[in-house]
Amino acid sequence: MIMAACYLDSHNPVHCYGCEACVQACAKGAIRMEEDSEGFRYPVIDDSLCINCGLCRKSCPFVNPPVRHIDEKLVYGGYHKNAVIRDASTSGGAFSAIVESWCDENYVIFGAVADGLEVYHTYIEDKKELALFRKSKYSQSRMGSAYADAKRFLKQGKNVLFSGTPCHIAGLKSYLRGKEYENLLTVEVVCEGVPSPLYIRKFADYIRETHGSRLCGIDYRYTDSAPISSPETTTPGKWDFQVMRLVLENGKEIKKDRWFNPFWSVWLNHLMSRPSCYECPFASVERNADVTLGDLWGVHLYCPDLYGRNGGSSLIVCNSRQGRTAWKKAQEHMFGRELDFPTALKYQGPMRGHIAPNELRAECMADLQNCNYLEINKKWAKRPTARLLWQKYVWGNRQKIWLWNLTQRLKNTFTSGK
């Protein structure tokens, strides 16, 4: 059997997911992560410290991909019953429901934290601190010692919930060298590739120059409405109208509409993603994590009863026995129901396959290195079409759900009148 070429040998960026498993596997500290010209981090070996033990390659998910779950899936759609938690979440609050039910005692939770423009993995031992891990980051997390810490806690008998992107989960599984732990639950988010950090840095430079203050925080999917304070509230949310909220060091806030935000245009056109994302093996129906979470896209088309007044709704896919067991307990915190997987899959492109390569990527990345923020956007960002704006703001999900509800009421009226 011919093994895949490791990035440490091939230096082909497609061969590295940036998971950092090799760094943590090295007992001699001979491997460090360094950025390339595109802003993505790759492992580099210090030959003066390396003893050629081979642990780095054995822990690489590209060389030794973990076994994927092929069990029959349990698919669920819905949102958290607590409106405060749902409002504080990116989608429907399913991750919080899992934490509440699975982390009852002797537990530790791993996840990604945003610190200014940087994103890194850490852990908490009190689920009251879960807010640290909420919200989408849209930046590849620096793993630090997360895998080693998780292994240490697992050996101590703690219940470990490890969350991240699919390549993070693959990195952890490879780092554990295929050993299964009953006290480990892995939860991944549906991922459409990670963008280059260079773009956000150019953006931060632009903000500092034009507003005279440093950009110190980004909420990529902020719901621009007053925070919900009552768990039982029925106030409609603004899931369909999320904006990017920028927090400046001087306290000023800037909000950018999603569909007029150049970041989304450049990234979603696959012009600046990590090279391995274009050949990602984890973007498939067979998953490495016990549970896969995502937005319930298509909710207005095939499960409108789960729209929940535009407050956000989650898709939950349980890929293993461990995942199904965990979700069975978590359901008590959710309003929702089981869904048909083939139907849900129609609206989840990143679960059907990796992102499509864009033949203009190399040119865009060259501009990203050499041009300023405005020059990059002028050339590569596309303004929303009239059709898109019509679909989002005039005849969008809210109107379609309203029509569905009206149809249901009329149907019930005629049926009861017979």
Image (cartoon, rainbow, N blue to C red):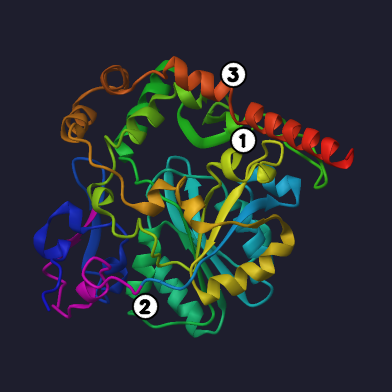
Per the model, the C-alpha gap separating discs 1 and 2 is 38 Å
Amino acid at dot 3: Val
| Residue 387 point in image, percent of width and height | 46, 18
Residue 141 at least partly seen: no
The span picked out in magenta is 42-67
Disc 1: which residue? 239
Vertically, is 27 above or below 380? below
Disc 2: which residue? 176
- Label 3: how many residues lie within 10 Å, few (<14), some (14-19) or many (20+)? few
Q: Quadrant of residue 53?
A: bottom left
Does 313 appear in magenta? no
> Which of the image's four quarters has the N terminus?
bottom left
Whether pointer 1 and pointer 2 mark residues with C-beta atoms closer than 8 Å, the reply is: no
Which residue is located at x 23 percent, y 76 percent? Answer: 58
Select label 1 or label 2 by which is in front.
1
Q: Quadrant of residue 91?
A: top right
Disc 1 element: helix
Judge left or right: residue 227 versus residue 190.
Answer: right
Residue 40 at least partly seen: yes
Disc 3 element: helix
Indicate which disc residue 394 carries.
Answer: 3
Vertically, is 26 above or below 155? above
Q: Report the front residue among 174 and 50.
A: 174
Per the model, the C-alpha gap separating discs 2 and 3 is 50 Å
| Residue 76 point in image, percent of width and height | 60, 58
Whether pointer 1 and pointer 3 mark residues with C-beta atoms closer than 8 Å, the reply is: no
- Label 2: how many residues lie within 10 Å, few (<14), some (14-19) or many (20+)? some
Amino acid at dot 1: Trp
